[in-house]
Amino acid sequence: MSRIIVKNLPNHASNVDKVKEKFSEIGAVTDVQLKFTAKGKFRNFGFIGFNSPEEASKAVQFFDKTFFGTSRLKVEIASELGSTDKPKSWSKYAPDSSAYKKIHKDEFADLNLKTKNKLKKMTKQRSIQDPELVEAIKKYRNDPDFIEFMELHGLADKIKEIPAEEDSGVESSDDEGKDEPGESKEESKAADDSKLSDLDYLKLKMKGSSKEAAERIVKTEKTPKKDLFSVKITNLPFTTGKKDVTKLFDKDTVSSIRMPRKGFAYVGFNTQKDMRKALIKNKTFLGGNQLFINECKEKEKEDTNNKPARWKDQEEALKNEESIAESGRIFLRNLSYAVTEDEIQATFSKFGPIAELEFPIDKESRKFKGFCVVTFLMPEHASAAYTALDGTVLRGRMLHLLPGKAKDIPEDDEDSTNFKNKKNKQLKAKAGSSYNWNTLFLDLNAVAETISAKYNVSKEDVLTGKDAAVRLALAETQLVADTKKFLLDNGVKLDAFNQVAKLRSKNVILVKNLPAMTSDREIRELFAKFGVLGRVILPPSGITAIVEFVEPSEARAAFKRLAYSKFKHLPLYLEWAPDCTLKSGDEPQNLGMDGDSDEIKQEKADEEGSDPVENDELVPEPETALFVKNLNFETTEDDLKKHFQKCGRIASVTVAKKKDPKKPGALLSMGYGFVHFYLKSALNEALKTRQGSTLQGHQLELKRSNRTLPVDVASMRKTTNMKNQTGTKIIVRNIPFQANQKEIYDLFKTFGELKFVRLPKKLVGTGPHRGFAFVEFLTKHDAKRAMETLGQSTHLFGRRLVLEWAESSDDVDEIRKRTAKHFHDDESSASKRMAKATFDMEDSKRKNIEGKGEEEEDDDDDDLVAMELGNE
């Protein structure tokens, strides 16, 4: 708890600034609340908030039993709102205290009398409405024994209330025909009517009272209001009170003073002459401030009178808004100005995933405004957060949570003819997805312009000729290499781009598809409209940029507004950079245990011939989910992961949970879960070794599951596998079908002498190629250089080439064995496919026995490799 309560404050400590100044000696004070009575009397205690619970504890230790003036303070940690540990109220101002009840005895006595009278009336009405009792009274009302019986039971009054059968219901008296002073003739007739029930009679009385009230309202409206001549005084000192304002003018002339807020006052005068005298004092000084006195016009009076009406209209509009359980939006206010976006995210993400967080920043002061809006992905999570966090303390201030107003969703245009506009809307809607374009994407037209300007040749010469595709691919590769070097020199971590980023930065944006030779100034002018910029990194080519914002909220606004918008003549492609893309200015180099950096270690590993450390797999294989049943309810996801981690690498672990009805916001285990591996072999190992194993006293039941990881297909980028160099052979995928073997050869010969280039075809010796190739170098050094250079972002005929190291086991015999095994394993589910594969295998063996030429044998080998790659 970062909030304390201070009791026994002196009377002169009713000023917030004095109290704040005194308690700021320990730490930053975020909130000071001094308590006053309804009449404005100081109650000599208050609440003070600090940034952290540690500072609050220090304040208690430092200030408790110390003196403020002549008063000895009592300082304690404040209790949570609604806490059971809260001490019992003792103050005479607290309604639930015994002291308050003693002072207000009459009020409680009146309440008790009212409740007793209500009960009596209810029992009386019930007894009167009892038909058996009514019949008995009518029949035996003159019997002395019956009258004695009724008196003994306290029901003698009932005889008088219920008339006899022969009575007419109208009693004769001397006052007959005379109405009561406040009773109309209609009411007296209604009262004389015995057939009229008591309820109907009361309704008539209510109608009469409502008519009288309406007549009174009309009379008050008819009475003319007295015209007041008012002036408006601005720039008053904040300490100015009504007495100070009265001293400015003659007491006899002032009829009213109204001060709606500090620094303003409205003064009314009886006559216009008095008002004009007051206007003469315009631009005079009071307490060091120059006053401005102007005549209050009718419009201003109308506006001030209409303010409550406007508030009422807003309240009426809010009544029709969706509740938190429907919209999933929560409005937070009374937040400390020192609160950060990460703190709000961490506080509310415990209840469920957050879809959006609106965290407004003041453009002038560059500080948080003290309120924000949190939108949950699931509305039920928002309800749990609202129940648990409303009234809690964050950084010394009590959170006030309200239902958030739902966003206005624009209706889709039903005009289906304009396809271009619809496509643009779809692209903008998907702009915030995890991945849209290659990180180092370069527009080929911009590449051609940059190369032509760099080598002083025409663009036509770059784009024409037989080797134009290879020339453009090499030019793009060169620009990518230059861009990488420039980014590394400017503190950008390129390793973050080589992996599928699980976390994205909140304030760093990648800006792609820029026209050639875009300047740094143009980028700053484009993005500076939305907030304060940090670093803007733009390589010399000016095709791709990295923009850093100081505030994440301003970065989101810029991203939403500029994604796919037109800059010059090209649309902007924006992407959130991976987390930790930019190095901090004083960040030390990552050193190992022996003092060498990671890069030096990697170089040593390459020189010694050892394999570099493997990274995590990017995407798990299909059908690698394991269903785990009969879990202990106390088992956590970490416990489950430790139990299965020896079987193989684990992609994710999930324990199924449900809401705890007894504890809002808490979750209960449902006794089962899922373990998702990266490889099928790991799943099979788990089924063999962990079936029936015991975890925290429960014997586990394991089954294969069809559950898959929630991976967005659009976000799975084609990555280059450069983690293990197994030799000199490279597999090149995603080759365009219009490319030929000579163009592949020309592309790779730039990096060293080639041993061979194979481009397998769909049919043996004829037909188009299969879209991949094998390239083998003479030396490992040349192969590694080609992989590092072409593997980043090289496009051939508009398609990005994906490079991988070919495994050492990719010889003909191994590939034949793996292919045959694959088809035999799938015999039950795909018999036709297996039969076809067997035929191909037998045919291939027959051709080999009969004696096939070396060139045809190579084609068969390539065909088998193609089948193996397709199966993978």
Image (cartoon, rainbow, N blue to C red):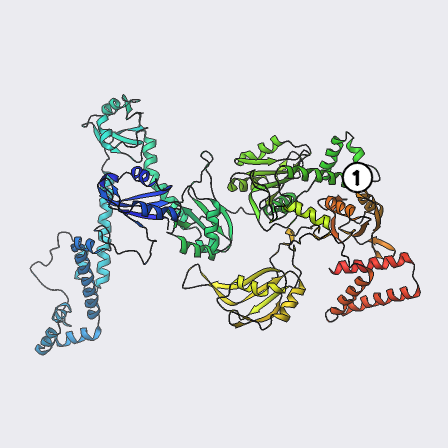
708 above or below 249?
Answer: below
Name the residue rendered at 28%, 38% in the picture.
Answer: 15
Q: Amino acid at mark 1?
A: Arg
Q: Position of residue 796 (x, y in %)?
A: 77, 44
Q: Count of labels shown?
A: 1
Secondary structure type for disc 1: helix
Q: Position of residue 584 (x, y in %)?
A: 56, 40
Residue 280 sits in which quadrant? Answer: top left
Residue 141 visible: no
The extreme front residue here reads 594
Q: Position of residue 326 (x, y in %)?
A: 46, 55
The extreme top residue here reads 280
Position of residue 539 in the picture relative to residue 228 (left or right): right
381 above or below 17?
Answer: below
Residue 181 visible: yes
Position of residue 701 in the picture relative to residue 161 (left or right): right
Residue 132 sits in which quadrant? Answer: bottom left
The extreme left residue here reads 174
Q: Position of residue 33 (x, y in %)?
A: 31, 44
Name the residue rendered at 73%, 59% in the picture.
Answer: 872
Label 1: few (<14), some (14–19) or many (≥20) C-alpha neighbours in 10 Å: many
Q: Nearer the viewer, residue 66 or 463?
A: 66
Name the residue rendered at 60%, 43% in the picture.
Answer: 589
474 above or below 286?
Answer: below
Q: Nearer the viewer, residue 738 or 537?
A: 537
The residue indicated by pointer 1 is 471
Q: Nearer the viewer, residue 96 or 148?
A: 96
